[in-house]
Structure formats: structure tokens, C-alpha cells
Amino acid sequence: MGDVLAGIQAIWEFDTDSVLIRFERGIRTPRLFQSLRERRVPHAALSSVTLTPGKRGTVVLRAVPRPGADPLLEAAAGQLKDGCDPYRLVLPAERGTLAEYYADELRARLGPDAGEPAERFLVAAPEAPMRFKAYDGRASFDGDRISFRWFWTGASSEKWKAGDQTFPVTELSGVEWRSPEAFEGYLRLVPRGLEGTVPASAEGGGLGGGPGAALCTGTARSVQAAPGRPTRADEDPAAVIFGLGYGPVHESLPFAAAVLESVRRKQSSPAAPTALASAGRRDPADIAERIHHLGELHQAGLVTDDEFSAKKAQLLAEL
């Protein structure tokens, strides 16, 4: 096609086998779009194309991706608001005829499998390295492993006792993302062997079933809590929790999508026999701060004498 269709907050460039979506910058452009910058969507990744009336004299052209084709939407699992949908192009109503032309052109290029879920991701995920600040810790991803480093002001005693965490993607089966715009948002990693389970606290909350939260493992859902897996995300060392100003959508969702894509890509490779490891701090000031906080938990009765002694010895050994 080789044409360009400019809308509000985005420009679509039509190629022979794909659509390149370039997002504009500006104070009115959603920060998620600014974070993504641009996305190339192959025609093979689309299931349908729609054109509908919009608000205040606009029309909305939307390319509907096939289930399983885009790691970003798989991670979001229906939680994105319409204004943050990267597949929507809003145009003035007077350009409706032109939009209908491009909608017909795209429909003509849909593949024979358009009505079927994609067997693999067809749209590229955001690229690592990535990081964001959650309420109880800092999350980082280098493409091979995810690290959580806890904040003493926000992390629970369970997370402090477990220590900072590092998770190789080869040891994971998926990721759960609950939007920070919802109640009790979080990002939670799913170790292998637990891909068919959902924490009991998610029952009735929509995990993996529409707005509310996402279980991005590609397996059946169960509302039974897994043995040994903390029910609450704020107690789970494999999770970071969000809050007002923490883990915003434009940071945490691309992060979740990048992790999910990496997990799916490496699932076909044999997993290295490495356990989930704790990453120790070597900065004496950090060690002293953690021992001080551990002492406060001990005095408050949240940590037993044995747990206090064992964790203190572990921290001192990191010096």
C-alpha cells in the first residue's frame, strides 16, 4: 500500500505486509504510547479491522489483533482503557471515507488464519533492559533474568526475610500483571510448575479472565492456591506491588510484556538446573540498614529469635 494515515496521537504507515504505528509525543498523548514510540504489526497478526463512530466528531479505525499475537495485549488481558489501546486510530469524522478505504484494504490482506489464535507472538515486545519502581521494591530485567530489590520502607517482613530476589526466565512459566489503576495492582512472576494455579486472593477478581488482572501462562486457570505459594502478592517474594505513583502502566506493562515474550521464547529450550537465587547486597550501608530494619521486625514480634539470628548471619556474610 505504501500510504500514510495521520490521526490523533498516532500515524499509521501501510506497507505490503505490515502496518507501522508511530505514536506522537505531547502532553495529551498517553504515556504508554510515548513509551512504546512505534510498533510494527504484521498483517498476519490481525484478526479483523473495524471502523466505528467516535466521540466529539471523530471516527475510530481499529485493527484487532489475533489472540496470542501481541505480548503487550496478552500481558494486559483486557485491562487497558480505550484511550490507551495502541491499535486504535482516532480521526476527524470528515476523514471517515478515507478511513473506510484503508479499513477495506487491510481486511483484504488478512491471512487465512485470521480467525484463529496465533501459535506464537507476531508483534515484537518492548526491548530489555528495563526497570521500574514499585511500592515495595525496584524491578529490573536484563533480558535473561528479573531482579527485585526491596525497599525497607515498603517491603513486608516476608520479603525482607527472603532477601532480594533474582529469577532466570528459564525458571518461569509466565507473569501476572494487575493494573496499577485497579485496586491492589501488582506484577507477579509464575515459577514453572505453578502455571495452572492462581492465588486464592484472586478468586472473583478476574485473574486471567478480563479486566482486573492477567495470568499470562497460556494454560488453564484454577482458583486454588498453590502449595507453598503465598496467597497475597505483598507477601510473595516473586511479586512487587503497585500503589499511587508506583508501577505506572507505561512502565510496568511493557516490562511484563518483555518478560512474557522472553519466557515464551525460551520455554522450548531446556531449562538450566538453577534455583531461584537471592541476590545479596555488598554495600555495608545497605547491610546495616537491613539489619536495623530486621531488628525492628524482631522487636515487633514479626520475626522469631531463630529467624532473626539466621537472617542476621546471612546479611553479615554478604559483607
Image (cartoon, rainbow, N blue to C red):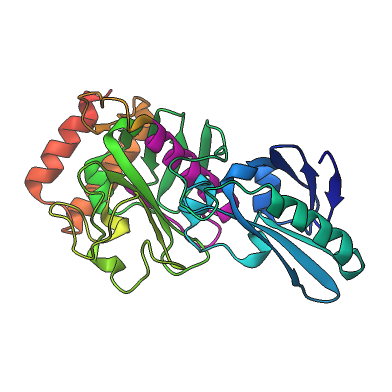
- The answer to if 258 sits in the magenta stretch is yes
Please report the residue visible at 53 percent of the width from the left and 46 percent of the height from the top.
Answer: 70
Q: Nearer the viewer, residue 262 or 66?
A: 66
Left or right, 20 with respect to 294, comes to right
Q: Quadrant of residue 276?
A: top left
Residue sitting at the far right: 94
Please report the residue visible at 86 percent of the width from the left and 75 percent of the height from the top.
Answer: 57
**Main SS class of the magenta portion in the image:** helix
Q: Nearer the viewer, residue 289 or 239?
A: 239
- Residue 244 vertical placement versus 152 (above, below): below
Location of residue 153 in the rendering, given as x and y in whole percent from the top left corner: 40, 52
Left or right, 103 with respect to 137, comes to right
Residue sitting at the far bottom: 56
Left or right, 136 with respect to 297, comes to right
**Image quarter hosting the C terminus:** top left
Location of residue 225 in the rendering, given as x and y in whole percent from the top left corner: 19, 61
Please report the residue visible at 46 percent of the width from the left and 29 percent of the height from the top.
Answer: 143
Q: Quadrant of residue 51?
A: bottom right
Q: Nearer the viewer, residue 239 or 133?
A: 239
